[in-house]
Image: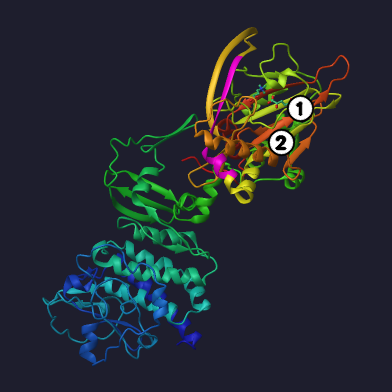
Amino acid sequence: MRHSPDLKHDMLKSIIIILDLLDEIGRTPPAGVELVPTLTKTMARSVVLSSNSSLLPREAHEAREETPRASGGGAPEQADERVGGDTGEEEEEPMEVEDGEDSDVDEDDNEMSMDEMSGEAPIVNTVSPAAPSPKPVAPKPFEYGPGMMCEDGNGKKILPIGDYMLLIARVVETMMTQSPSQRFTDEFIQSGGMQKIMKLCHLPCITNESTHSTYITTIANIVKHIVDFCHVIDSKIFFHFCDIFNQGEEIGLSEYGTQGKTGEFPLIWLRDTSPDPKTYTISPAMTARNLKMKEFDVEQKSKKIWIDEQSDSLKVEWECGLLSSFPSKWLQIRNPSDQEARKRRRKVYLFPEDTWGNEEIEKRLKRFSYEEFMNNDRVMHDFLEAVCIDGIAVLKGAEKGKKGAVEAIGKRIGMIKRTHFGTVFEVSLKADASNMAYASNSELPFHTDFPSLSHPPQLQMLHMLRSAEEGGNSLFVDGFHVAEQLRKENPKVFRILTTHSMEYIEEGYDVHDIDGKTIRFDYDMCARHKVIRLNDEGVVNKIQFGNAMRSWFYDCEPSKVQDVYRAMKTFTDHCYQPRNMLKFRLEDGDTVLWANQRLLHTRDAFKNAPGESRTLTGCYFDWDIVKSRVRHLRDKLSLEQNQPSA
Ligand SMILES: C[N+](C)(C)CCCC(=O)O
Ligand SMILES: O=C(O)CCC(=O)C(=O)O
């Protein structure tokens, strides 16, 4: 057989006929015949594969000829690759195979030698040790349909359909795994063999406890093999498979696709996420779960699970009577055990994937037209996405000197974050300055804004209304990049900056407009932050530092203070290294938006033209607002990165 592809091809044709036949008989049993899921229920004992490859009850065969039994055989390394050996489930009436130790799949009980299949050693045994010995059954000539019957001890006509199913599945499994062949696998798929095998599970006479577990394990091995050998697999097959597994506690492990992905759908998760109106309210203004955890039965089970071929969806009927329908596409996108799907899902948070130094950002700093940003959703998306990923992007060419650009951009993004400096602030030389940026035309130190706040603004935007005659360039550095450099190049400094909290104080007042009225707002801000903050996984996720507001207080032993200063100094030196810094000039009408808890920024000294005053306007944003706009645009524009909300 191994070297006889045509024989395999012919055998496949017979298998397909038999599968169809089983389905037909299973749906319309011959009159007077009881279909039983397994011989263990009926005391009929086993099934043989006769030398002409036809199916007969074992008793009939035994009565005709004495046939020696064959041992399982097979290549152990293939058995090792099998799935589903331990289902973790107790079976009340195990359907035993070969010598019947237990029903779990292991290398002995699940394999049939090629000899067995070719008919030389034809017995596949399905004997229950608990079953009393059957009376011999008189030999019957082979015929399809009723000829596949046998009689139980009381002369009742039964058709052990569960055993036939198992036998044929095992034949397929063995043919596939014992001498793997691309042709056989492809032909099997193309002839709908997989669907046919799975469809049998849905026969009304087939019960979960009696037949499924062993049958499923066999199917699992077939599917696993297909994954290795087939280039394309129909999603319907995959979900058929899930469906079967789902008869237990959860939709179990299956494999599909060529990348060997797994699909594991916990049953309770299916109940919880069921896209039906009882579970969810999905209206234009709201997507929200109706289920309340207080009342939610997290131990509930399904009553029935099946595949609806027409709608290509998995249907689940729950104990409470609710019917859930999961289109296969729905399942594919959300597949909790698909690493790719999980990776794709993590992108929804729009976290930066890498950091930049001067060389990288000079190449990739994204600049967009202000007009296009205002009028083209795709441009707005790309601009905001760049801010999420690179931490900075620029809008060029708003009307020079025209006030209101910050407000207009803010409105388009959604919502400006108001601070104790008002909604929109102006950076220019001011008497009684409330901030160093307003106090002189000198260079400022690299800083993040407002470390004095326990929740400093996450993004900052500046728009150039009137640039300086000389200087006043904008400088940025990726604090995440500097942090990573220090982690590598100066671990001691990295440790101090990630463990010691700096305190910041901001005491004073600012005067700003609220609804056309000039308001003086007095404040006394105080907060503390580590210069470099790591998340639970040790990934740098915030930078906060500003020398102007740094306080006098060091919450550590005095002997440690010197090292803290050294660490701040080293950090600052790195910020100013040419390999790290980005420098550009905002022309009148240009706007820059950046991540204030990632990038440090500053300006260099400037000289005003006579009678002019360098002036910028600016505001702050929260990530939530910016990222929500990005996701909203992905949905609105049907961009490929769009992800469903429920
Ligand atoms: C930009 N501005 C002046 C409104 C605030 C600066 C915040 C800071 O110096 O930390
Ligand atoms: O004047 C500038 O260009 C920047 C001002 C600044 O750094 C700030 O306001 O935080």
Of residues 496 and 212, the one nearer the viewer is 496
Query: Magenta residues?
Result: 493-508
Regarding ligand 1, which quadrant of the image does it lie in? Answer: top right
**Residue 544 higher or lower than 83, as above or below:** above
Question: By what rule are the colours in the image chosen?
Answer: rainbow
From where the camera sits, is residue 297 visible? yes
Q: Name the image quarter holding residue 150.
A: bottom left
**Residue 115 higher or lower than 244, as above or below:** below
Specify the farthest residue to the top. Answer: 517
Of residues 547 and 130, the one nearer the viewer is 547
Give the total of numbered labels: 2
- The residue indicated by pointer 1 is 443
Side of 124 relative to 375 (left or right): left
The numbered dot on residue 605 is none
The numbered dot on residue 476 is 2
Of residues 227 and 207, the one nearer the viewer is 227
Closer to the eye: label 2 or 1: 1
Q: Position of residue 459 (x, y in %)?
A: 62, 31
Mark 2 neighbour class, 10 Å CA radius: few under 14, some 14 to 19, many 20 or more: many
Side of 546 relative to 305 (left or right): right
Q: Name the image quarter holding residue 264.
A: bottom left
Q: Tell me, yes or no, whether the two marked residues, 2 and 1, touch with CB atoms within 8 Å.
A: no
Kindly identify the amino acid type of the residue bearing the numbered disc 1. Answer: Glu
**Residue 183 higher or lower than 524, as above or below:** below
Q: Position of residue 404 (x, y in %)?
A: 72, 19
Q: Position of residue 292 (x, y in %)?
A: 33, 35
Element class at badge 1: loop
Kindly identify the amino acid type of the residue bearing the numbered disc 2. Answer: Phe
Residue 40 falls inside the magenta stretch: no
| Alpha-carbon span between mark 2 and mark 1 | 13 Å
**Which residue shows up at 43% across the image and 68% down it?**
223
